[in-house]
Image (cartoon, rainbow, N blue to C red):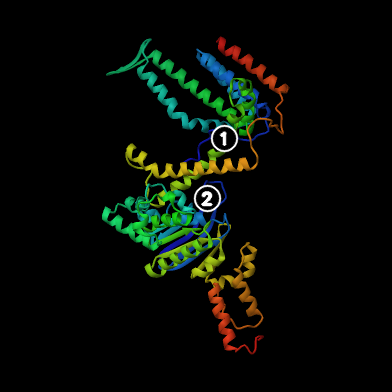
Amino acid sequence: MFKNITLGQFILRDSFVHKLDPRMKILITMIIVIALFFISSFFGFLIGAVYIGMVIFFSRLSWKVILRGLKPVMFIIIFTLVIHILFTRGGTVLFELGFFRVESEGLLTGLFMAVRITLLISLTSLLTLTTSPIQLTDGLEYLLNPFKRFGLPAHELAMMMTIALRFIPTLLEEAEKIMKAQQARGADFETGSILRRAKSMVPLLVPLFLSAFRRADDLAMAMEARCYKGGEGRTRMKELQLKNPDWIALAFTAVFVAIFIRL
Amino acid sequence: MFVELKDVYYRYQSGEDYILKGINLYLKKGEFAALVGHTGSGKSTLVQIINGLLRPTRGEVFIEEKEISSWKNPIDIRKKAGLVFQYPEHQLFEETVFRDIAFGPRNLGFSEAEISQKVKQAMEFVQLDFEEFKDRSPFGLSGGQKRRVAIAGVLAMEPELLILDEPIAGLDPRGRRELLEQITRLNQKQGITVLLISHRMEDAAQRAGRIIVMNAGEIALQGSPEEIFEQKEKLQSIGLEVPPLTEVFSELRKRGYPLRADIFSVEEARDEILRYWGENKCSKISP
């Protein structure tokens, strides 16, 4: 049941994209995400898709992995499309049946949104697929450092993220185990009305939360036993350094963004 | 045969290695069997297949001569075979002990009166006082008590076969002994068929009439405790140890002392040594 979630998954490859500085990757992702919101033509989206396609190519990941990551959000994409087709008004009437009316504006906006979400998700999943959680949080910490001046606990936030990511698979495994145990006691998670199904989650969620708290307690204790005291005065084994490939990637991205925003 | 597995193979996904490789196994009604093996030998997967939680990739599972994939309602399998998972106390969730134990029978659709009676009985089996514990929160109990509440939760469903996955792991010696005694009593007094998973040979040998040794997804050895421990080399080759007591006795017999081979507890050992001592009137200690 929980096996198909690729969110936050990292796949190690020896590739150009994998070797980039995480800070640069986060920065580029942010630039592209913002740019995707400025695109206003299908041709622009096409260029955006070409860009993402090239990133996938250079990351040596298979297309299937990206597509698999899109599966869980398929519902949202289709939902957006349908809502826009049915309720956004404007342009010429394309189709009419009773009070169903599809207008050109609705279809267009719907398609725009669907393509936009698809590209956004593929891009952001590419970031996590090519960057190990440790690198990712390291990068974030660096990027958040300037905000420390305003009281932002950059290191603590990064540490929290690392821990959260680390425990996703553990908690999924735990959930599956508890689910089986309750099924062995005759619990039924799959049939019945929505209300019944929501209620049937209680025997799963209570033990799951309890175990999460227990783990959190243990972890906090273990960290303290190893003298963890936050980011103050903490050094790292691998300092992040921007190298030539990072600047090349940035330049490459800048050219693309310039093209597809113009279109 | 109460439970029978015929050539069962299991793997999580096609393309992966098989976790179970051709298991042939039977359980007789009313017997106490132990499943022994390393972590990762496939014990837990195997019992989930018997319980119907996992479907075998290949092969057949019969409960009372009926193939379980032909059972329409999984609940019917749960009524036959109750499975207590590892660290079952981690699955407690209700506000009171009573309601937690009642979860199983309630899912099986019993009436309130029946549920109440089944909970009472289940608590009696695991020696938890009904009046004292029924309204307490399961989270405020000691580790051993929690474990017993969780086991009662499965017992309240009145399964004919009780499968326990490492039921004594993490308990102190006293808790271990008490729980094993309760399980033995269930088997002897109530006639419940028991399959006990353990990686501790001592527990298996003391309690079970038959030991099934698993290794790397296959059944390596099968037989009475005496038969199993005779094959010391084979056990050691798969990394399992003969219990120290058994080892002492087999060593003594090798040196010519006519002692019994089926000694698995300290009490039995004491009695056996005293018997031998008495018969020989302390006069001749060496054979």
Disc 1 from disc 2: Cα separation: 23 Å
Structural crowding at the residue carrying mark 1, measured as other residues with C-alpha within 10 Å and reported as few (<14), some (14–19) or many (≥20): many
Structural crowding at the residue carrying mark 2, measured as other residues with C-alpha within 10 Å and reported as few (<14), some (14–19) or many (≥20): some
- The residue where tag 2 is placed is B11
Q: Position of residue A42 (x, y in %)?
A: 50, 15
Residue A90 sits in which quadrant? top left
Counting labels gives 2
Q: Is residue A132 above or below residue A201?
A: above
- The residue where tag 1 is placed is A9
Q: Secondary structure at mark 1?
A: loop
Question: Can residue B163 be seen in the rendering of this structure?
Answer: yes
Q: Secondary structure at mark 2?
A: loop
Residue furthest to the front in view is B132
Residue type (three-letter) at the residue carrying disc 1: Gln
Q: Is residue B252 left or right of residue B268?
A: right
The quarter of the image holding the C terminus of chain A is: top right
Q: Is residue A126 left or right of residue A248?
A: left
Q: Looking at the image, which residue is at 56% across and 12% down? A: A261
Q: Is residue A6 left or right of residue B141?
A: right
Q: Chain of mark 2?
A: B
Residues marked 1 and 2, same chain: no
Q: Looking at the image, which residue is at 60% across and 83% down? A: B258
Residue type (three-letter) at the residue carrying disc 2: Arg
